[in-house]
Amino acid sequence: MRRVIPNGVDTTRFRPDASERAEHPTVLFVGTWENRKRGKDLAAAFQRDVLPAVPDARLELVARDVPEHPGAGIEVLGRLDDDELAAAYRRAWAFCLPSDYEGFGIPYAEAMASGTPVIATPNIGARYVTDEGRAGVLAPLDALGPALRDVLQDEDRRAELAAAALERSREFDLAGVVDQYESLYRATPAGGPRRRPRRTAARTPGAAA
């Protein structure tokens, strides 16, 4: 029987703290402006569907390939170290990464461990991390803006999503993932076939996974 062990998240760093939440509705994106992370598409949806209804909303981009003037309501944070990134997750009212593909999607898990609601396109990684949308909002790209707007305007919905996200994120706690690997190694018969686990790239501070 094949056993799936997820990537781990350091929940001592990525953790909720409501006292750090931004005063204004804030959406966080971690990724790239171009290509599969689709930061440019998120910015367009934010300006088209969110700003007219929530004029004080802000979109924060943790990305380095953003144009000099990305548009109204958008702030470019550039490259962040892990502690700065964790603070950005806690500050955000929602996290949005509309990738067309993610194998796992570490940023989704980091946001969820921080108690920040996740809005994503239904790529394979987002579907897995959010438990098929039970711990987040999955919306096709053309419905992303309205989904994001609705979450920002509904405090009860955000609280519901945050609670579900925290519950789901426990499955990605780094200490628990290490325990699963140790259990797997102990269960491997001595002298039996042993496969080395596939390695995943370590997070580069401030970069998307």
Image: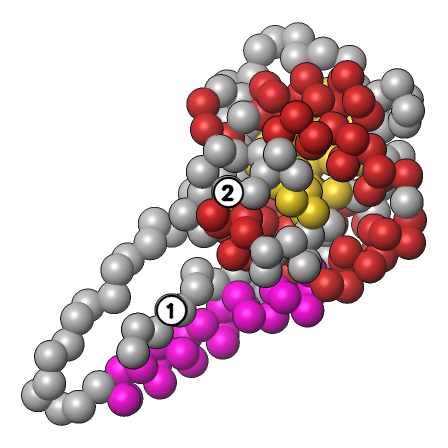
**Foreground: 207 or 137?**
137
Magenta highlight range: 165-187
In this view, 45 is above or below 110? above
Count of all numbered marks drawn on residues in the image:
2
- Dominant secondary structure of the residues highlighted in magenta in the image: helix
Q: Choose top left, top right, bottom left or bottom right for residue 133.
A: bottom right
Q: Choose top left, top right, bottom left or bottom right for residue 154.
A: top right
If you read the primary sequence from the N terminus, does the residue marked by circle 1 or circle 2 appear first? 1
Amino acid type assigned to the residue bearing label 1 in the image: Val
Disc ID at residue 118: none
Most extreme residue toward the left is: 191
- Kindly identify the residue that appears in the image at 52 percent across and 56 percent down: 128
Q: Mark 1 sits on what residue?
A: 4
- Whether 71 is among the magenta residues is no
Asked whether, in this view, residue 147 is left or right of residue 83, the answer is right
- Whether 168 is among the magenta residues is yes
